[in-house]
């Protein structure tokens, strides 16, 4: 996007009055802050904006490229509804909030973002004269970032460690003189490092734009977790995994602070908690809550579809046997639940830091 003019009128979009009805009218409330993206721009100053699931025609003086993303503040003026671009000139806000505003609009599921890159690669491979070996190498790199059925917990741990979340920490270790083989291995195999390399190597085009969005999505997750840590909320990590012929996204809510109940305290055992949520196309959303100590493991499974809940109930003994491989006494329960109970991160921006700093996004 071209640098924004200092004129307030040149930093705004005016939605078409014909579009201001139904659900969109409820979304565009005065004072709200929304993530926007340019889908198309015509020569007469007309643009088509994406605001969550809404497509909004609007007028603007800005010269924008398709794919440009930014945050907009809704303002009801005497001349009608205006969407003002939030720029760094607004000032007076924490650095973390400014950083979030640059990337939060790209905070999409990692499986969806990597799938978009894979789709672009397939499209490039179909073109005459495509660099076949190079593109196939990119496709293989992406596939190596997806958790596959049958892989071990150790392999999942490695995938999470190289998910882009710890890239800057590894760089800091390297700058402090700790360039050991483990640090070098982490840096070279980290998802964020690979996306940055792709960004430098690729020519301008749809594939490079998909990589930019995936990189911004990884950074959004990093920054949101930093914001959560500031207010003592649990961190949320995501990773892609196979779902039939495509990929989906699993999310982990990790409670960093260990808690103790009276019995565990007497035994000197910490209670650790993790929640895992994933939605497969064949089964629908399912959630697993794990609570474990040195000697016990409690697992609660909640499914949104009745047929899956019944299947989990029928396989109760098999599942208990599977979890018992941890060497702990297992307590397993499963039941049918509402979609709200099962889904993790239905609104990833609903965190204390952003509530106190008045940042809101439309997630669809």
Image (tube, helix red, strand yellow):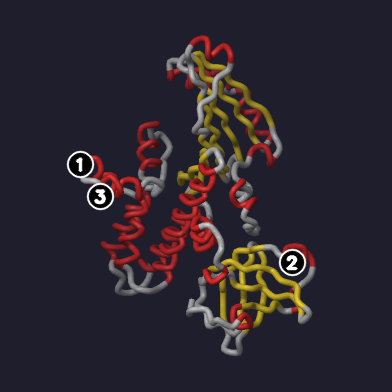
Above or below: residue 191 compared with residue 268: below
Q: Residues within 10 Å of mark 2 (few under 14, many from 20)?
A: some
Which residue does the numbered mark 2 point to in the structure image?
A: 30
Q: Are marks 2 and 3 in contact (CB under 8 Å)?
A: no
On the question of residue 246 being in view, the answer is no
Tell me what residue is drawn at x 33 percent, y 74 percent.
128
Tell me what residue is drawn at x 54 percent, y 71 percent.
89
Which one is earlier in the sequence, the residue at label 1 or at label 2? 2
Which residue does the numbered mark 1 point to in the structure image?
A: 181
Q: Is residue 19 left or right of residue 179?
A: right
Q: Which mark is residue 175?
A: 3
Residue 107 location (% of width, % of height): 53, 56
Residue 88 location (% of width, % of height): 52, 69
Which one is earlier in the sequence, the residue at label 1 or at label 3? 3
**Measured Cα–Cα span from mark 2 to mark 3:** 47 Å
**Toward which corner of the image does residue 20 lie, by quadrant?**
bottom right
Q: Are marks 1 and 3 in contact (CB under 8 Å)?
A: no
**Toward which corner of the image does residue 29 lie, by quadrant?**
bottom right
Numbered disc 3: secondary structure: helix
């Amino acid at each position: 996007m071209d640098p924004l003019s200092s004129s307030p009128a040149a930093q705004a979009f005016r939605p078409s009055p014909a579009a201001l009805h139904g659900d969109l009218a409820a979304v565009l409330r005065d004072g709200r802050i929304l993530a926007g993206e340019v889908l198309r721009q015509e020569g007469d100053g007309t643009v088509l904006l994406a605001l969550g699931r809404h497509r909004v025609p609007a007028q603007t003086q800005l010269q924008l490229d398709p794919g440009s993303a930014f945050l907009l503040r809704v303002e009801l003026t005497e001349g009608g509804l205006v969407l003002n671009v939030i720029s760094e000139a607004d000032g007076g806000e924490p650095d973390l909030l400014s950083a979030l505003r640059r990337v939060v609009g790209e905070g999409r599921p990692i499986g969806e973002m990597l799938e978009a890159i894979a789709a672009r690669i397939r499209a490039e491979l179909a073109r005459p004269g495509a660099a076949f070996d190079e593109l196939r190498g990119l496709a293989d790199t992406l596939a190596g970032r997806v958790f596959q059925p049958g892989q071990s917990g150790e392999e999942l741990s490695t995938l999470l460690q190289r998910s882009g979340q710890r890239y800057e920490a590894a760089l800091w270790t390297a700058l402090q003189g700790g360039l050991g083989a483990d640090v070098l291995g982490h840096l070279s195999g980290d998802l964020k490092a690979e996306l940055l390399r792709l960004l430098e190597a690729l020519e301008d085009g749809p594939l490079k734009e998909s990589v930019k969005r995936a990189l911004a999505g990884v950074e959004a997750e990093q920054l949101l977790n930093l914001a959560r840590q500031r207010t003592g909320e649990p961190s949320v990590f995501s990773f892609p995994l196979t779902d039939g012929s495509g990929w989906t996204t699993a999310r982990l809510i990790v409670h960093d602070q260990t808690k103790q109940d009276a019995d565990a305290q007497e035994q000197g055992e910490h209670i650790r908690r993790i929640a895992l949520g994933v939605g497969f196309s064949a089964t629908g959303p399912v959630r697993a809550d794990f609570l474990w100590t040195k000697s016990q493991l409690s697992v609660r499974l909640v499914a949104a579809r009745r047929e899956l809940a019944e299947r989990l109930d029928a396989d109760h003994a098999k599942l208990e046997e599977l979890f018992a491989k941890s060497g702990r006494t297992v307590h397993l329960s499963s039941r049918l639940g509402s979609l709200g109970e099962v889904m993790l991160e239905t609104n990833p921006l609903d965190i204390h830091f952003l509530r106190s700093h008045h940042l809101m996004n439309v997630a669809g």
